[in-house]
Amino acid sequence: MKTHYDLIIIGAGPAGMAAAETAADCGLSVLVLGEDRLPGGQVYRDVEQAEPGLIKLLGPDYEEGKTLVGRFRGTSVDYAPEAVVWEVEPDLTVGFLAQGDARQVRGRRILIASGARERPVPIPGWTLPGVMAVTAADILLKSHGIIPAGDTVLAGSGPLLLQTASRLIDSGASVRAVLDTTPFSNHLASLPYLPKALFAADYLRKGLAMKRVIRRSGTMIYRNVKRLEALGSNFVESVRFTGNGTTREMKVNTLLLHNGVVPENQITFLLACAHEWYDVQRYWRPVVDIWGNTSMPGIGVAGDAAGISGAKAAEVSGHLAALEAAFALRVISEAEKDLKSVPFKKRLSRERAVRPFLDRLFRPDPDLLVPRDDHTVVCRCEEVTAGQIRKALELGTTGPNQLKSQTRCGMGPCQGRMCGLTLSEIIADYRKVAVPEVGYLRIRPPIKPITVEQLSTMRLIG
Amino acid sequence: MFKRRYDVKGPTVTVTIEDKEITVPASETVAAALLAEGFAYTRTTPVSGALRTPYCLMGTCFDCLVEIDGIPNRQACQTRVRDGMRIKIQKGARDIES
Amino acid sequence: MGSCNMGNVISTNPAADVLVVGGGIVGSAVAFGMAEQGPRVIMLDEGDVAFRAARGNVGLVWYHGKGKGMPRYQEWCLESTLKWTKFAERLHEVTGIDVSYQKPGGLHFCLGEEEFESRRNLLETIRREAAPKPYDFQMLDRKTTQEMLPRMTLGESVVGASFCVHEGHVNPLFLLRALHNGFKKFGGFYHPEHPVFEIRHSGGEYVVETPKRSFSAKKLVIAAGNGTPRLAKMVGMHIPAFPEKGQVLLTERVRPCLPFPCNRIRQTGDGNFILGSSQQDAGYDVKIETEVIQSISKHAVKVFPLLAQLRIARSWAGLRVMTPDAKPIYESSESFPGAFAIALHSGVSLAAVHATNIPRWVLDEKRPEGFESFSSRRFNVQKTL
């Protein structure tokens, strides 16, 4: 590995891999830093080593990742798996940990392709053992062939909810119920956005197929679910909810929660890139153009980190961002960039066309964004409850950073990944203002932990 | 509660979890192994001693912190098992080791 | 329009006796102390992402080593340190908030013989300047220092330390919260999100303009951190304060193992180690710099090699309010009587006297003895007004 590269790509998911391919094609020197052992990100996690039986179970969307990974492996880029980025500086220096050592590299351009993370789902009892994110179950299945034993319930909203439910059922798990919190009103509100293109029908077909799998297995689906609660003392024992008008309590061994995914934007916040609040899906995304340029020179974003658009769109945006990098570094001309980007731009529009509809159909229920029960834990790391946050607000605190100082919310190892959005929502709700007016936690390095030893012995790039 | 879909075949390693020797697939992460082996909790929190198990399994939530080979607070979901590895439940805040 | 709907703020404030501009550690301590006496006090503050030195603070309540060349400052620090225990108790009594003040004594480590000698000389000098009043400190050799710290092996280059029994530490964030809480309990009016852009004197009162509305009072205290020079100028005071950046690292929580706060390292009540700090003239830039935090890490490991194993969880950068001689400025305006300005960087250590002595100065016009020493006139400043 060198210390200087034309392009440093953070993330080895579809956006990162596609960008690497195009950047290498343009003749740039490229370093890809991936956090996991194998390339693929979350959506194509461990696809390289997946057995045929698993690939069949997970379906063609997963299998496509294999081709992409294969092409990535065929490029001449430098690839560092298990590389954990802890700092990115405006001068395009990247600090990361690899094999226990802290290292610095510098790019002439950086591409952030860090993907997405789960939106937190702060329901009462969500910190109990046995309650996990839906994508966690997906990871266990994909990477390890491990599934929930005992009675499993999935709760929340979003495409991944049904997809994971049907995958788990197909893999032999006992899924008792799917509790869909998608508000009924979303169905009507999203209809105007239903595109007429072919693939939308394709998408809807897939959704119906998943529902068939679920129903055929005897799994109950409840809709317009409200007042979700995980109950139990030392581990989750039951889930309580109101669905189809009645309040029920269901015994459960594993409760899987999901309320959509949001951009993994720790790095763009760290760099103080301009962000905008995307109200439909209640998350912050960096302000970018179609090439992924942010407000900071030399910093680009591709894939879900720029706004949730799915794996295929991520791939295409990776190609576009790489072309932009090559152009910005004067390796290709603007004319060449424009020419090469034509098919990608076309594809991107197609892949993104279903988004306005999906985003509105799966608009998160406001009740799941602001915990009403004061006992609900908001900051999992420091065990700060909604009640404690509201109390601090009563005392006159106005913003997330002051609240962090006063309550410790956001001070733990996850550095706001699990609580930052909820914190802003609670403040906005209390003050009766829009979330953009409230702002977000200030993100500082290290964005992943680094030991005093590692930092003190790191060789500075100078 | 989790289980492996199939009997363990392929390469395995022997690790010690809470002083008990267990053989697990070599490709598992510590988090996956702990879940598959049925551990009811993998850490107690420094603030209140509450019981926790991994939540996100992708390195984001930091709920999967355990002690591995004497080093506390390591993310179990980001660490692959290794032959001879000693894994312990993280009990509250870490200590400073001489 | 109108003030925000929080706490005991009502939409039209009655006329205030004193306006405090600045809701940081200094402003809120003075406001707390004044509100406690009975007068109507209004405290104005900025919003959520202000530069707030208060939040970048390490939390030491420290005295020894300060004040060379200015005995009055040394005395002032000692007075505050000795008052701190009662002050913390009072805060707890009024607000129910425990600011986690502990006073185990404090160590200032010396790496290498030269540093040890130079530290000794400094402290001896201050002792001479303080005479005939006592000045408490001891120079401890390495062996004695190590005996005080059974769990924390000292690095090789640590030859000893200066020790003072009066030193302690506190949670500066809880302190700020307690001061605000107490202020409100005493009937004070707190207005966040009201940055002040203009001050004038009109009709016998100080009128203060914020984007949302104006406020007025007979008396005015400007304790607006690095915003003080600009505002103080409007009421006839020249305050040569400037920002000095300090960066600080925080580690993961650790079970208690360091019983004494040290000049650059302390373990908080929650178990995190705070590793500080740097001093840089960097304007208003609050970015974390890798070279700086690396040097902080290196220093920490030199003092306590065992710290190497700890994970850094987060970092802070704060802007201290620095003055040309690093000593406080307490000014009362000659041309605008009843207007006061404060600029200093030891707001936490001095919080106790800020809550007791300064209110008397502002409210009763009883200037503390020897306070001329703290006037900004000591910088031979030209008054250009």
Image: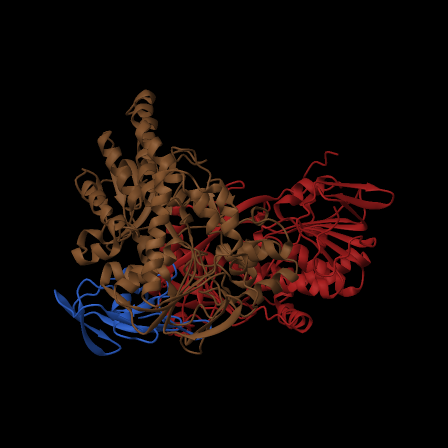
Q: Position of residue A122 (x, y in %)?
A: 48, 63
Is the residue A382 above or below the residue C24 in the image?
A: below
The structure residue drawn at horizontal position 24% and vertical position 59%, both measured from the top left corner, is: A143
- Specify the colour of chain B: blue
Q: Which of C78 and C276 is in front in this view?
A: C276
Q: Quadrant of residue C359?
A: bottom right
Q: In which quarter of the image is residue A118?
A: bottom left
- Specify the colour of chain A: brown
Residue farthest to the right?
C203
Is the residue A454 above or below the residue A285 in the image?
A: below
Q: Where is residue A184 in the image (x, y as percent from the top left)?
A: 51, 56
Colouring convention used in this rendered image of the protein: by chain
Q: Nearer the viewer, residue C353 or C120?
A: C353
The total number of labels drawn is: 0
Residue A216 appearing in the image: yes
Q: Position of residue C38 (x, y in %)?
A: 80, 64
Instruction: Tell me, by letter, which chain the rendering colours red.
Output: C
Q: Which of B67 and A126 is in front in this view?
A: A126
The structure residue drawn at horizontal position 67% and vertical position 55%, both measured from the top left corner, is: C27
Q: Quadrant of residue A194?
A: top left
Q: Which of B23 and A239 is in front in this view?
A: A239
Residue farthest to the left?
B10
Residue C369 appearing in the image: no
Left or right: A1 as drawn, with respect to A337: left
The structure residue drawn at horizontal position 57% and vertical position 66%, both measured from the top left corner, is: A388
Left or right: A323 as drawn, with respect to C32: left
Q: Where is residue A98 in the image (x, y as percent from the top left)?
A: 26, 52
